[in-house]
Amino acid sequence: MKLDIVNSDNEKVGAVDLRDDVFGGRVKTDVIWEAVVHANAAARRGTHATKNRALVSGSGRKPWRQKGTGRARVGEIRNPLWRKGGTVFGPQPRSYDYQLPKKIRRSALLAALVQKLNDGAVVVVDRLAVEDRKSKTTVAMLRKLGATGKTLVIDVAPDEGLALTTRNLAGIKVVPTGRVTARDVMDTTEVIVTRDAMEKLQETLA
């Protein structure tokens, strides 16, 4: 499989060969699903918290004596059985992250890239750099490359100007090849990859 390499003005300057043994396989949607579910779980903040009987406000004094009143025995007003008492086994802050095997993560990333290649949503660029460090310049450059919706930009070491000018642009994400995930790829409509990044991905995913 061959893909055209374009410059920042969307003019063809070459071509890159994609190995069929790497990008020629079927799209494993089940693996993509596993990776996306894992990424969504890891992204959860998990800050939910309910107050148990130790945290809810109220005195620890015994409301009435144990025997002789005819009423049910009770130790404190923070009892979970009482109104405004503590919650039993309520949610507490925790991490939802879990370990996903490296092979599955790589397989999912490859499958996601193959899906985007099949959809014609991948553009290979010779080089991406923003010299004047202006967001307006970045938007114009990405539009020339056909980026109209949510866009993922992948580079081996992203240009500092590009990284700075996209921080305040909604729908544009710039990631190095070592940190890109299947969720990043599937969450966008266009994927822009530099020549060096495509070669690195091909080497890593082979």
Image (spheres, grey):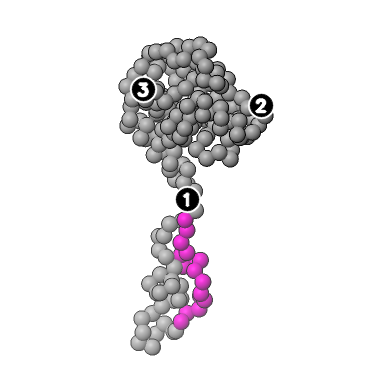
Of tags 3 and 2, which is closer to the observer? 2
Q: Can residue 107 be seen in this view?
A: no
In the image, 104 versus 148, the foreground residue is 148
Report the disc number at residue 92. Answer: none
* Left or right: 71, with 200 as reference point: left
Element type at marker 3?
helix
Q: Give the range drawn in magenta.
A: 48-63
Of tags 2 and 1, which is closer to the observer? 2
Q: Distance between the residues labelled 1 and 3?
A: 36 Å
Magenta residue check for 49: yes
Q: Which amino acid does label 1 sit on?
A: Gly
* Quarter of the picture holding the N terminus: top left
Vertical arrangement, residue 191 with respect to residue 202, above or below? below
Q: What residue type is labelled 2?
A: Glu
Contact? badges 2 and 1 (CB < 8 Å)? no
Q: What residue type is labelled 3?
A: Asn
Contact? badges 1 and 3 (CB < 8 Å)? no
Residue ranking furthest to the right: 132
Of the image marks 1 and 3, the number of the one nearer the N terminus: 1
Instruction: Give the residue number, with chain letter if any, for mark 1.
Output: 46
Quarter of image, res 111: top left
Instruction: Give the residue number, with chain letter if any, for mark 2.
Output: 131
* Residue 140, horizontal then vertical, whole percent: 56, 30
Q: How far apart are marks 2 and 1 (CA)?
A: 40 Å
* Residue 5, horizontal then vertical, whole percent: 50, 15
